[in-house]
Image (tube, rainbow, N blue to C red):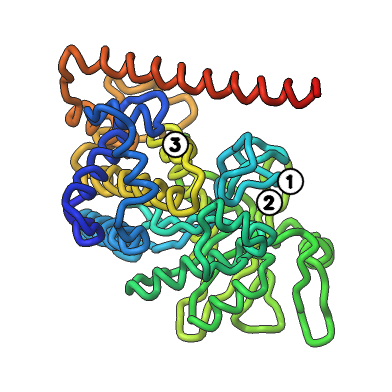
Amino acid sequence: MGALRGCFARTQTWQQAAKYVSALVSELPKRNGWTTAEHAGDQGPDRMQRLLNRASWDAAAAMSEVRWFAAAGLTAAARRGRRRGCLVIAAIDETGQQKTGAATAGVKRQYMGCAGRVANGINTVHVSLVREKTGHALIGARQWIAREQIQDPVTSLVMGLPLDLEFRTKGQLAMDVCADCYADGLSFDFACGDEVYGSCTRLREFFEEHGQAYVLRVASNFTVVLAPGTKVTCADAVRRLLKDRRRWEVRSAGKGARGERWYGWAWIATASPRHHLLVRRHLKTGELAFHYCYVPEGQLLTKTRLIRAAGLRWPVEEDFRLGKDGLGLDQCQARLYTAIQRHTVLVMAALAICAVTAAQLRDRTDAQAPPPLTPDQAPPPDPGMIPLTATEIKHLLAAALARRKPRSHAARWLAWRRRHQARARWFHQRTRLWREYTLVN
């Protein structure tokens, strides 16, 4: 948190932000203005609510500091572990938070991956820095705001949207985050994303203009130019060119918790010498996944590097899981655009602390027994222990930062909650009486 001091106008606000991050890494079952304030020892939620809504501090500068901290920490951990030649990936993905009302900035009925269906909620595009065999952390975020909310001046004012905010698609939001990363001096071997970003022509052009190699998932109906005048979809290209099983090569997409992730891979050239189509086939189900790849001139282009890059997109899902389950990324109850952004930045700071610490302790805490070599091999007498993960680091930090509260603290908060609920109940009853009075008359 010391690196963030320059982002705050007042020392007291910075100290309150440190209390907020401490509450995020705690074992609280739910993280909102009330619970974080009670955990911090405040007498009420006013200070936490002011931190997110009205306090003077620069969330964009704080995100830049978090980005630098994560990049420098993961780089130092890779050097300490002497991991040379490992890829550095910018993994792009979005995550959402379900909402019930219509007053939150960016809320709209849309497909929510967290719900697996169309639901009311908000979506935010994230970029995760993934350093192969070292660690990963979220380093950038942009919330998606619907066009009609930006264009409606009343709605824009109520939601606290900036006056200069323009509508951006998810692909364009990914461009903005990556541009911030480039401005801060970060570089990546590859950028990876799912079909939402692979189908965005402007995003692909943005990467190519910046000389950024990418491996982006595309849909089966995505068209590629195999030769001048020959344009086919990805599915047609597989049916025409990959009928022979000998054209497929079984390779690992990287190690998972249960071992190597084996798939069948095929590499199809296009009319452009810098663009290729990489096809992945599930060995059991035969399900196909298509990756449109670009490697600028002067950079190493091999099938092995493309497969490694394609297999390094999944750590962003681990960041989302820890951010939501352990740090309250999807528990923000703020409604204003700035407040949601500030909550996201502080969650990213907490996640970066856990990720960098786990990466730097990876080699010193790895005591696993050698993996089995045969299916019938007897288990070892002592399986050892896996390296400390970011989740375990979060639990250790929660225990280390826990503070004993005075006996009167719980009673004071109990009284505050009861008084607040009584006030809310009184106003709800008065509103209902007004509605009933209107109906009667």
Q: Which residue is mark 2?
A: 281
232 over 416 or under it: above or below: below
Q: Which mark is residue 299?
A: none
Q: Residue at x 69, y 59 (%)?
A: 148
Asked if residue 261 lies left or right of residue 246, the reply is: left
* Of the image marks 1 and 2, the number of the one nearer the N terminus: 2
Cα–Cα gap, marks 3 and 2: 21 Å
The residue closer to the viewer here, 383 or 387, is: 387
Cα–Cα gap, marks 1 and 2: 6 Å
Asked if residue 277 lies left or right of residue 402, the reply is: right
Q: Which mark is residue 257?
A: 3
Q: Residue at x 61, y 65 (%)?
A: 171
In front: label 3 or label 1: 3
Which secondary structure lies at badge 1? Answer: loop
Q: Which residue is mark 1?
A: 286
Q: Residue at x 23, y 48 (%)?
A: 13
Looking at the rendered structure, the kind of residue marked 2 is Arg
Can residue 195 be seen here? The reply is no
* Of the image marks 3 and 1, the number of the one nearer the N terminus: 3
Which secondary structure lies at badge 3? Answer: loop
Looking at the picture, how far across and down is residue 124, in whole percent? Answer: 54, 52
- Quarter of the image for the C terminus: give it: top right
Q: Which quadrant would residue 440 be assigned to in this image?
A: top right
283 over 115 or under it: above or below: below
Q: Residue at x 70, y 46 (%)?
A: 110
The residue closer to the viewer here, 190 or 83, is: 190
